[in-house]
Amino acid sequence: MIYDFNYLKPGSLNEALSMLSEHKDECKVICGGQSLLIVMRQGMVAPEYLLDIKHVKELNYISFDAKDGLKIGATTTHRTIEKSDVIAKNYPVLVAMENKLASIQTRNWGTIGGNLAHADPAGDPAPVLISLKASIKVGGVNGERTFPLDEFSVDYFATQTNEDEIVLEIQVPVPEPKTGAAYQKFNLLDSDMGIVAAAASVTLNNDGTCKDVRVVLGNAGPVPLRVKKVEELLIGKKYDEALFAEAGKIASEECEPVDDIHASEAHRRHIIGVLTKRMLKKAWDQARA
Amino acid sequence: MEKQILKLAVNGQDYEVFINPKTLLVEVIRDHLGFTGTKRGCETVSCGACTVTVNGAAVKSCSVLAVQVEGMNVVTSEGLEDNGKLSPIQKAFLDYGSYQCGFCTSGMLMSAAAFLDENKSPTKHEIKESIEGNICRCTGYNSIVRAIDAVAQGKYKEE
């Protein structure tokens, strides 16, 4: 049963931020509510005020230019991202990820900002966006700040936003030439969250050696996990499947997965190793093509 | 908590309901307005039995706050027929035996209707993806996919 709350419906972003600064920790922000309403129904979250930003139009946009890259407003739905031509052309891995995020119904109502703010380590967008070097812009009545998305989550379902701030925008730089990116989650039903997941992006030099690489794991610890040891291993190296296997082994050792009803810790580590190896190969192949 | 008036259109008819803001869309549809075609299943955004369309897009009404659809057009399975005349997807479900216990049917119909509005010539794979958010515990998926495919192939076009 959902506990009673006072419903706040701001007409603009400024109004939303001033309402939030007034109520702060008594207030929870809702957008699509596809994650929040579940925990509210379970009674785990029972805010005194619910601030509804679903229809704050200023935060609903996708823009792209060849210099600044991609900007996605926080209240943009997953489905809008999935159907965006400009994202399909420049960041196909984002469309592929969205296409496997929950179900069509959830993607129609749920939003990218809400997904990130919920900070479930099993969420699909964060690992992919971090592998693409995305930043996040948050803000409140006292101003805005932008920082790398890999610094956003700090623990299970916890982010570094202050109590008077909301997520405003996701920014993704233009990929460098010769860049490939891939993401896969391991699950039993297509519309489930990943039991574990791995995202990889690879950028190559003209001589075919690795210029830059990122591997980010989903549901492999309290936050989306960037495996920096794999980056150190691969930069400067040439295509080598034995190296990908070594990277998989490192990822399976570096992660901190839980042991639960869906899979044991050992099984999760094994799958993370396999996915890391495969995603690196897939991203590298794309970068070479 | 302050109750408030919600204005919305359901199946082409305008309504005003007086609700606690925590009321879910499925509760307005079933309990306030009496459209019991829409089912409450898992109530955790998993099963899809509560699927309705909001401004043409399929959503799970168990996990949408009713106050968020202020001024919007909601369609439930009751809204698919027109004066007693079944819509193509409803006829196809009958012809292809696309249900067993029937609990998932209204949600399946709404996902299928929204999908067919958006994609006029889908592949079999796209049809399967279109109902990925709807669970049929009788596992009658094949006949449901055949029914959607039949409508997409134009078998139920009006003369």
Image (spheres, coloured by chain):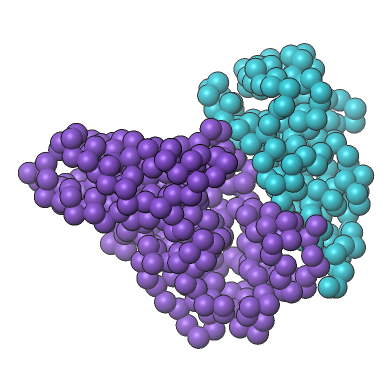
- Residue depicted at x 84% and y 51%: B27
Q: Quadrant of residue B142?
A: top right
Residue B141 vertical placement versus B19 (above, below): above
Residue B81 vertical placement versus B16 (above, below): above
Query: Foreground: A233 or B113?
Result: A233
Residue A266 visible in rendering: yes
Residue A82 visible in rendering: no
The location of residue A203, given as percent across then percent down, is: 21, 48
- Residue depicted at x 54% and y 27%: B126
Query: Foreground: A265 or B71?
Result: A265
| B52 left or right, relative to A187 | right
- Residue depicted at x 37% and y 38%: A270
The mark tally for this picture is 0
In the image, the chain rendered in purple is A
| A180 left or right, relative to B93 | left
- Residue depicted at x 54% and y 72%: A166
- Which residue sits furthest left? A207
Query: In the rendered image, which quarter contains the C terminus of chain A?
Result: top left
The location of residue A7, given as percent across then percent down, is: 75, 71
The location of residue A80, given as percent across then percent down, is: 53, 49
The location of residue A169, given as percent across then percent down, is: 46, 66
Q: Colour of chain B?
A: cyan
| A256 left or right, relative to B59 | left
| A135 left or right, relative to B35 | left
Residue B90 vertical placement versus B40 (above, below): above
